[in-house]
Amino acid sequence: MKPKKKSLSDLGGIMFSTDPDFVFEDENIQPAEALPNNQQDLRVTLDKKNRGGKAVTLVTGFIGTEEELQKLGKMLKTKCGVGGSAKEGEMIVQGDFRDKVIQLLQKEGYKVKKSGG
């Protein structure tokens, strides 16, 4: 799931800093707890929105660290032989590889559902 976008009230009154090294530290943010593969509930869809008519396979619902997400995304892209990206709990594989992605994720032990047609 995507984290909720921050509003100005969430920042505790800090709106702007001219210090280039300033990093706002929010004590309310907790790192995503990594779930075992068999407890992950992933959705695989074909997406064409805002991509110039090009189709991509979109995998959503991943819960875990950014490093694990990158590792799984790289494995999917390598096995399909295409490009893509992995960020914010989503993996994008260029092209229509829904069936292949579902098979690969099931081999890794994930619960996978095909959604959206």
Image (spheres, rainbow, N blue to C red):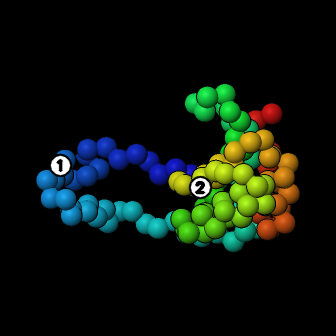
- The disc at residue 1 is none
* Count of marks placed on residues: 2
In the displayed structure, 60 sits above or below 48; it is below
Judged left or right of residue 55, residue 15 is left
Q: Nearer the viewer, residue 20 or 107?
A: 20
Label 1 Cα crowd, 10 Å radius (few <14 / some 14-19 / many 20+) = few
Mark 2 and mark 1 residues within 8 Å of each other at the beta carbon: no
Q: Secondary structure at mark 2?
A: strand
Q: Position of residue 9 (x, y in %)?
A: 25, 46
Please state the horizontal and vertical placement of residue 117, each as a whole percent of the image.
80, 33
Left or right relative to 72: residue 116 = right
Q: Is there any visible trace of residue 58 in the rendered image?
A: yes
Instruction: List the residue tagged with mark 1.
Output: 16
Could you tell me which residue is drawn at 66 percent across and 60 percent down?
73
Tell me the kind of residue under disc 1. Phe
Q: Secondary structure at mark 1?
A: loop
Reply above or below: 2 against 36: above
Is the residue marked by circle 2 packed among few (<14), some (14-19), or many (20+) residues within 10 Å?
A: many
Q: Position of residue 51 (x, y in %)?
A: 60, 33
Q: Which mark is residue 86?
A: 2
